[in-house]
Amino acid sequence: MRHGTFALLLLLSPVASVLADNRTTEAEEAAINDPTAECVPYSYARVSDALTSFPAIGKNVTALLPNDAAGHAKFQSISPGIPNIAPRGTLGGDFLAALEAYNLTDTACWWILARCINPVVPGLSVDLWRVPESRTVGYAFEDGPSCSHNRLYNFLAEQGQTATMFFVGSNVMKFPLEAQRAVVDGHEICAHTWSNPAMTAATNEGAFAELWYTIQAIKLVTGVTPTCWRPPLGDVDDRIRYISSQLGLTTIMWYDESLNMVVNDAVQGYFDSNVGPILRTQPLNNVTMQTAIYDYRKLTAAFDHIVPIGVALNKTQPYAETNYTLPNFAACACPASFLHYSQYPLSSSPR
Ligand SMILES: [Zn+2]
């Protein structure tokens, strides 16, 4: 422990001189409009004080930290029930050999192989990929928080639009004030993972730890405990579903990767009767945030409602904590409309 703290000080002290000193609150960070300035690293005490209780930021987690008594106790308590399904592929998402070797009867309900969403193992819930409301989008973004997301968040705020954010635990630790903005702006926070790995490649403990530390990071920084998650790349099977469900997380997939396909299906009337698509947008970065703004225009033209997934599900209590609420679908005055149209001319569309 002492050695770890010393190493951390060595690591942080040369950097400290170039850290931004102008932001300690969510409001300060949210007020910055220059993406370069937004992305100047800063130190945030709540995070720096807790770094030794978390794995390395941005690195795959393969095991619980040795001193994490609560993590080890929880993992041991769920271990006997974890389905006996072998890890496959690589954490980086190379499934080629695994796909070739895989038994085509798919007894694991591996989504990558068969787009399976109906678990074989008893007691597991079917993955969510649609919402039960007509002409309604379950609106979602992956991989945030991003240090340069103010442009997108400002846009969403201006439109009166909220969404579901699948946060990467490492990014929450890197950009805590940005993570807090999601809660302040009324977005719904779900977990992604700590480091965006292919989860079915992880060991039981590695998969558990990826989710465990993401939940802890979101709780530390934002005060809420997420109850939903999305597997990176959609890489989930019954072993991973079991582990996530034991951490209180509902698995949320998506309707179709292609926004044009989603819009086309809306035009064809696929969503006219008590069903709407859950979106998968590109991971957040400067370019894709710009794309998201133009995609939003297409969605508003094709759908009647665009809401966070939890709102479409009438999940008014989205977190383990009871002092945060989402509106239910009926109470959400959220028609799909594109405001301030002239500020976003088609000619500057990236497409
Ligand atoms: Zn991702």
Image: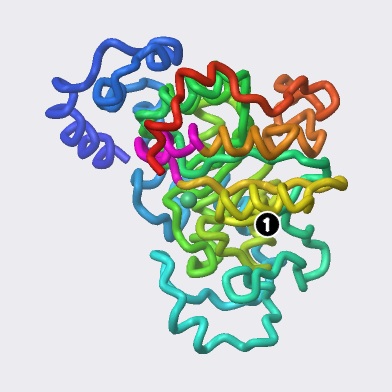
Left or right: residue 165 compared with residue 345: right
* Colour setting: rainbow
Q: Is mark 1 within 8 Å of ligand 1?
A: no
| Left or right relative to 34: residue 301 | right
> Callout 1 environment at 10 Å: few (<14), some (14 to 19), or many (20+)?
few
Q: Position of residue 234 (x, y in %)?
A: 57, 60
Please determine whether, in this image, residue 46 is positioned above or below residue 28.
below
Q: Nearer the viewer, residue 288 or 323?
A: 288
Give the residue displayed 54% in from the left and 68% down from the top.
200
| Secondary structure under the numbered disc 1 in the rendered image | helix
The image shows a total of numbered marks equal to: 1
The magenta segment is 283-294
Q: Is residue 217 magenta?
A: no
Looking at numbered disc 1 in the image, what kind of residue is underneath it?
Answer: Ser
Identify the residue under disc 1: 77
Can you give x and y, in whole percent of width and height, for residue 25 in the image? 42, 12
